[in-house]
Amino acid sequence: MKHLDFSLHFTTKGQTVDDIRKKFTDWLAKDNHQTLPETDDDDEGHLVLHHCFMHRKDIEAKGWSTEIVDFLEYICDDIVCWFGASDQSLDLDRLLMLQNLKRVHGVAIFVGEIKDGVKDEYELAKQLGVDTVIIP
């Protein structure tokens, strides 16, 4: 089965999770899923989402809202969470995720305004040569 690997990058500063969900699902509905990477395998593929948000159990333990992780689980069943992968820093986790995404011919999808930490992720993805998509 082919894997269609992608990462999703966004900030909730200036947009809600519902705004992000709508932008992403509208983009997919316009047949943009073809932008997602494919392999040569003839089997029907499935999406694999890579992200650096906290794990659900950690969010729940802190008593924080699970709105973002709920959204991520809503859009994709197969998820690779890179948060804490380096045991050093979130910046290194993001680097590892994007390096891996490049290795598996994935695509980094940016939703909404590219600012703050999302801007750093975008610049890193471009520097590494990861295919990128911007959904305004």
Image: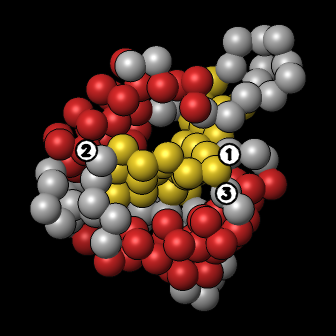
- The circle on residue 20 is 2
Toward which corner of the image does residue 3 lie, by quadrant? top right
On residue 130, the disc is 3
The reply to whether discs 2 and 1 touch (Cβ–Cβ < 8 Å) is no
Instruction: Name the residue located 65 percent from the left edge and 72 percent from the top edge.
Output: 127
Tell me: 9 left or right of 3: left
Q: In front here: 13 or 112?
A: 112
Label whose residue precedes the other's in the sequence (2 or 3):
2
Q: How crowded is the residue under tag 3: few (<14 C-alpha within 10 Å), some, or many (20+)?
A: many
C-alpha separation, residue under disc 3 versus residue under disc 1: 7 Å
In front: 22, or 90?
22
- The three-letter code of the residue at mark 2 reads Ile
Q: Is residue 16 above or below residue 48?
A: below
Q: Is residue 98 visible?
A: yes
The quarter of the image holding the N terminus is top right
Which residue is rendered at x = 41% and y = 72% of the image? 119
Amino acid type, residue under disc 3 in the picture: Val
Which residue lies under the disc numbered 1?
106
Measure the alpha-carbon separation of dots 2 and 1. 20 Å
Mark 2 or 3, closer to the camera: 3
Say if 65 sits above or below 36 in the image: below
User: Please, what is the three-letter code of the amino acid marked with disc 1?
Assistant: Gly
**For discs 3 and 1, the disc positioned in front in the rendered view:** 3
Question: In the displayed structure, would residue 92 be above or below residue 78?
Answer: below
